[in-house]
Amino acid sequence: MAVVIAGCGDLGTEVGLRFASLGHRVIGLRRSAAKLPAEIEGQAVDLSAEVPKLPAETTIVVIAMSPDERSVEGYRSAYVESVLRVAEAIREDCAAPPRVLYVSSTAVYGVDDGSWVDETTLAQPTSPTAVVLLEAEETLLKLIPEAVILRLGGIYGPGRTREIDRVRQGIATISSEPEFSSRIHRDDAAAAVIHLMTRQDWPESVYIGVDDHPVDRREVVEFLARSLDLPAPEVTNNSSSGQGSHGKRCRNNKLRETGFVFSYPSYREGYTAVLDGAGVRHA
C-alpha cells in the first residue's frame, strides 16, 4: 500500500522509514525533499500554500508537521494550512478514503496544576499556539471525521539532548516545587503511529501518546546527573513554578488498551538509550 507522510522532520521520517521497512511504498512531503533517505520518495511541496499530489492507491496519511517559528502565525501556517491542503489532496486524488492520523500535542489541555489528564479531559488550551493546535485538530475532524488525533507529550530521543546538555554544562536547575511533565521517546511515538494506522480495528478519534511514567522534572535531572556521574544541581526557587505552573500528568491507558507496547516505558530506559548513543536524529 502507499503511505503518505506530510511533514518529514525527525518524527515523520522515522515513521516513514518504519513503514518502508514493512514493505510499503512511502511518499514524504516536505519543502526540502532532497534531505529524505532513499527509502522515502520525496515530493518537494510547501503545504502551507500548495496542494500535494497523492497516489490514487494511498491507504494511510500521517500529518506530522512542525513550525518554522513558535508564533501563532508560524503554527497556523504549519498546522491549520497543511491540514487544509492535505485534505484537499485526499479529496482530489485518493481512489478510496485513506486512514488519516494527525500528530498533535498534549499542550491542547492547558492544565498546569499537576493534575491528571486523559482523553476525557476537556481540551482547553491556554497558550495562543496551543489554541492553533486545537483549531487544526477541529479543522481536520470537520473535513475527515474518521481521522485519528494522536496527542504526544514531550518528545525526546536521538539528538534531542537539551536537558542532558544543561546537566553536563552545570546550568540545569531544580525547583523546590513539582514541575510535572509527560514524555515519549521518538521511537515509541513513531511506533504508536504505525500501530494505530495498521490495526485491524478502526482506531478511535483521540489518543494520548506518553510513556508510563509522568514525572517531576527534578527526578529526571537527578537521574541524568547520576548517569553522568555529576553532582545534582542545587534546589532553587528560581524556576517556572514560581509563576504557578506545576505541569500535568497524562495517562496512556487508552493507547495501552489497543495492545501497544512501549520500548521505553519510562524516561529511565529512554534517556539511558540516548546517553548510550542509540539511534540517529533525522535532518
Image (cartoon, helix red, strand yellow):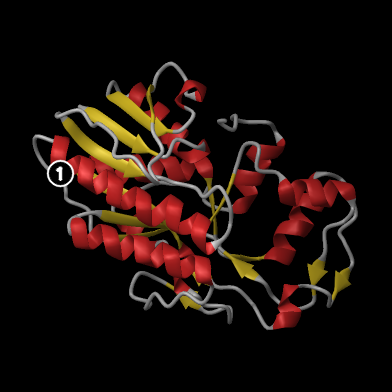
Q: Residue 134: percent from the left, percent from the top?
A: 39, 66
* Quarter that holds the N terminus: top left
Viewer-side residue, 249 vs 261: 249
Q: Amino acid at mark 1?
A: Arg
Q: Residue furthest left?
A: 95
Q: Nearer the viewer, residue 164 or 38?
A: 38
Write the residue at 45% across / 46% down: 189
Residue 19 seen by the camera: no
What percent of the width, then of the height, locates residue 72? 51, 63
x then y, percent, for residue 60: 24, 38
Position of 97 compared to 271: left or right? left
Residue name at image x 50 percent, y 59 percent: 73
Left or right of residue 260: residue 275: right
Q: Is residue 2 above or below residue 219?
A: above
Residue lying farthest top? 38
Counting other residues with Cα less than 10 Å from the Cα at mark 1, is it few (<14), some (14-19), or many (20 or more)?
some
Question: Extreme front residue here?
Answer: 49
**Up-down relation of residue 5 to residue 48 (above or below):** above
| Foreground pick, 240 / 260 | 240
Image quarter of residue 237: bottom right
Q: Quadrant of the C terminus?
A: top right
The local secondary structure at tag 1 comes to: helix
Can residue 271 be seen here? The reply is yes
Q: Which of the 4 image quarters holds residue 39?
A: top left
Residue under pointer 1: 91
Instruction: Identify which residue is drawn at 49% across, 29% down.
Output: 32
- Between 241 and 229, the one nearer to me in the picture: 241
Q: Position of residue 84 (x, y in %)?
A: 29, 52
